[in-house]
Each structure stands twice: as structure tokens, then as C-alpha cells.
Image (cartoon, rainbow, N blue to C red):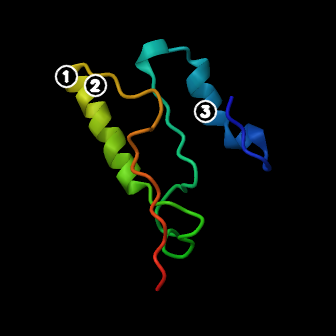
Amino acid sequence: MVRRAGGDRRHRYYRYDAVLGAELGPRQTLYRIEGGTHTDAFVDTYPERLRPLTPCHRTAFTALESWLTQGRRPPPTPSRCPPKETPRPA
């Protein structure tokens, strides 16, 4: 179980635990992206703390499409997610 310091674990990981508890074996893949939020709305405001998730979503959907159409399993970890870029000084 991946845990993050602080906060109420019951609320934060409810869906994560539900996916793992479903025991779907090879039919499930769950990626947790560190430093991301639900949307990219605050990335420009806090570039030193957050990373844009849109590039991660694109690579995840590409992997899903390859899995469904070509039978290629996605990687076990989101290693194909583009690395977080270092913010450039203004």
C-alpha cells in the first residue's frame, strides 16, 4: 500500500483500495502520479510543486489503446510518463 504523510487515509485512498480489492489480476492497471492534482489548472500558479498531468494522461491512454488493439500490456509503473520539467525562470 502506498501511503502519503498527512491527511485522512480513508478518504484519500478509498478508490485505490477498491481497485486493489476487486482482485482483477492482469485486467487492472492503476497508476498513481506523484506531484499531480486532479486538473492542470494550478500548474502555472505552483510550477515548483505541481506537474502537468495531460502528458501523463496521453501516454496512459496510448498504452491502453495498444493494450486493447494490439494486446501489448501497459508497463507495471508509469515509467513512460514524461518526467517533470524543471520550471524556467521568468
Residue 31 vertical placement versus 85 (above, below): above
Amino acid residing under circle 3: Tyr
Query: Left or right: where does residue 74 sit relative to residue 20?
Result: left
**Viewer-closest of 38 and 43:** 43
Residue 21 appears in which quarter of the rendering? top right
Residue beneath the point at 49% across and 31% down: 30
Cβ–Cβ under 8 Å for marks 1 and 2: yes
In percent of width and height, residue 65 lies at: 25, 32
Query: Left or right: where does residue 67 sit relative to residue 32?
Result: left
Residue 40 vertical placement versus 13 (above, below): below
Amino acid residing under circle 2: Trp
Q: Earlier in the sequence, mark 1 or mark 3?
A: 3
Question: In the image, which is nearer the foreground, mark 3 or mark 2?
Answer: 2
Mark 2 falls on what kind of element? helix
Label 1, label 2: how many angstroms apart (C-alpha)? Answer: 6 Å
Label 3, label 2: how many angstroms apart (C-alpha)? Answer: 21 Å
Read off the residue under disc 3: 16
Mark 1 falls on what kind of element? helix
Query: Left or right: where does residue 48 sit relative to residue 87?
Result: right
Read off the residue under disc 1: 70
Cβ–Cβ under 8 Å for marks 3 and 2: no
Amino acid residing under circle 1: Gln
Residue 28 appears in which quarter of the rendering? top left
Residue 19 vertical placement versus 82 (above, below): above
Query: Left or right: where does residue 89 sit relative to residue 66?
Result: right
In percent of width and height, residue 57 lies at: 38, 47
Residue beneath the point at 66% across and 35% down: 14
Mark 3 falls on what kind of element? helix
Q: Residue furthest bottom?
A: 90
Read off the residue under disc 2: 67
Label 1, label 3: how many angstroms apart (C-alpha)? Answer: 27 Å
Q: Residue furthest left?
A: 69
